[in-house]
Image (cartoon, rainbow, N blue to C red):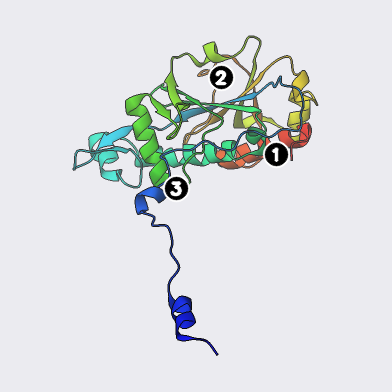
Amino acid sequence: SVSPEQQQQQQRPSKKLKTTANNNVPPPLELAPPPVSTVTSTKKEKIIVLLDQATLETVKNRRGLYELLNCDDHRDICKKKLRKDPNAFRPDILHQELLALLDSPLNKAGYLQVYILTNKNVLIEVNPSIRIPRTFKRFAGLMVQLLHKMKIKAGTESTTLLKVIKNPFSQHLPAGTRCYGFSKEGKLYDPYALAKTLLLPNPTEAIVPTCFVIGAMSTGHVTVNDHPYIEQMLSVSEYPLSGASAISRIMTGIEHHWGIV
């Protein structure tokens, strides 16, 4: 039998630490886990990617707050005030492409460096360690903050995750970099054959850096006229692909070629 004192002890609630909602709020941005690579050499030749013609513009709403201009929320402003096609303002394309690049095993292994060039000729450097917000609403707020403050730092550290840098883009490329643009009109390659053709089997032995210019716009494509340093236009499918889909094919080919799983 159980005594009355033992019954009271069993019914008595256990003491727990009090937590507030504020203690559980994550920082505005956080660093991704450090890159993990099976390569022992400290020298890594990164693949440079430029996301070209991204539509990043801010607009003031009725409450006096700035928002990222997009076709869903600002259709009337695009038509009446800007007198432009609302479908041209697609910052969600850049969001999808950044997720495809920064979530790739190639980036997690430390072999990727990403830049963004907007339709307003604003050049942005992306820290490979950044963890891009998963929802577009949070991503849009981040881009507005970047365009106004010119840089974004990690919430808990002094590390700069995004920053606006000086043009032209070519001055940020290492000497001897070979640049290739991607478009449906380019020379067709299988993703695996493309990586085998352009890159050495061992990334630590790469002497000449490689740069890929990929469009982040809703219509049109990358051209040599906009980027005279492009040697050749390439394609990874005979069908029109979204930017994120094309990036996934390119990354998969390189990862297979370099043995990154």
Estimate the spatial distance between the alpha carbons at disc 1 and disc 2, rounded to whole Å: 25 Å
Nearer the viewer's eye, disc 3 or disc 1? 3
Relative vertical location of residue 75 with respect to residue 259 in this rendering, above or below: below
Percent of width and height locating residue 86: 35, 41
Residue at 52% in and 35% down:
31
Q: Mark 3 points at which residue?
A: 135
Of residues 185 and 103, which is closer to you in this image? 103
Of residues 19 and 126, which is closer to you in this image? 19
Label 2 element class: loop
Kind of residue at badge 2? Val
Question: Which comes before the other along the chain, label 2 or label 3?
Answer: 3
Residue at 36% in and 43% down:
71
Question: Which comes before the other along the chain, label 3 or label 1?
Answer: 3
Of residues 31 and 48, which is closer to you in this image? 31
Q: Mark 2 points at which residue?
A: 224
Kind of residue at badge 3? Thr
Percent of width and height locating residue 118: 43, 27
Label 3 element class: loop
Q: Residue 252 carries which label?
A: 1
Percent of width and height locating residue 158: 45, 26
